[in-house]
Image (tube, rainbow, N blue to C red):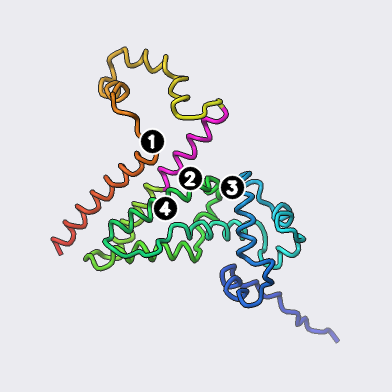
Amino acid sequence: MNRQKTDAPPAAAPPLWERVAQAHATQRPTLTHGTIADAALRIADADGIASVSMRRLADELGVSAMACYRYVSGKDEVLELMLDTVRKGVLLENPRGDWRSVLRASAMRFHSVILRHPWITDLPGRILFATTPALLAVAEQNLTALDGLGLTTDQMAAIAAAVTAYTRASAHDEVTRSRLRSPEGWASEDDAKDANAARLDWLLATGDYPTYGRYVHSSAPPEDDTARFEFGLDCLLDGIATRIGKATAGS
């Protein structure tokens, strides 16, 4: 007689954030999802995202690699925990007040988070776009600030996304320029300008770029990256304020 096969396939593990929620009451104090994320952050901040591995993480924590695998399935989940941890830095302690002050403060924090943790710019899309609790909390914070202004939910989301996109692009540009200067031996943007001074002087002398030449030879001290970012952010917020005024006037 043939025996029927009754073995069922193993059940899939619950999603990461469901496991995190379930583990709060049972994790050993010496090893938690939080301590794993913190250790991985120390590694990435010191040596870059490529240095984060399960073996390096276990060494940092002083445990076996298998101990880490009881909490995460592998490096991708470690990266997700790290990203969620730094995203919490965008949350405001008291996100009350007008929509502009909330979105501006949130953007300033997001900009600072990327500059403090430049490895964020190296994350793969499957991690960067992963839905995490902190991502939703930041979205909730920013959308709530725009709620009640007579905007549709799509308009609220588009405004919040525009501020996020500008902030991310500005910070990523700063990180990229810093990385490109280093191999050339340039410690600052001024060093990069000095290296190209002769080329720039010749091009400006042609007279083809009078407005840019006026900018280069302006007597005003050059603004730093943060000042440029804040000016651009305020221009964006000014435009949004005008658009909100028009939208509410027509409703």
| Disc 3 residue type (three-letter) | Asp
Q: Quadrant of residue 182?
A: top right
Q: Quadrant of the N terminus?
A: bottom right
Is residue 180 placed above or below 30 in the rendered structure?
above
Whichever of callouts 4 and 2 sits on the residue coming sooner in the sequence is 4
Residue at the spot 56% in from the left edge and 26% down from the top edge: 185
Whichever of callouts 2 and 1 sits on the residue coming sooner in the sequence is 2
Inter-mark Cα distance, 3 to 4: 17 Å
Does dot 1 land on a helix, a strand or a loop? loop
The boundaries of the magenta stretch are 168-183
Q: Quadrant of residue 223?
A: top left
Inter-mark Cα distance, 4 to 2: 10 Å
Inter-mark Cα distance, 3 to 2: 11 Å
Query: In the rendering, which numbered label is found on residue 109?
Result: 4
Asked whether 187 falls inside the magenta stretch, the response is no
Write down the residue under mark 1. 224
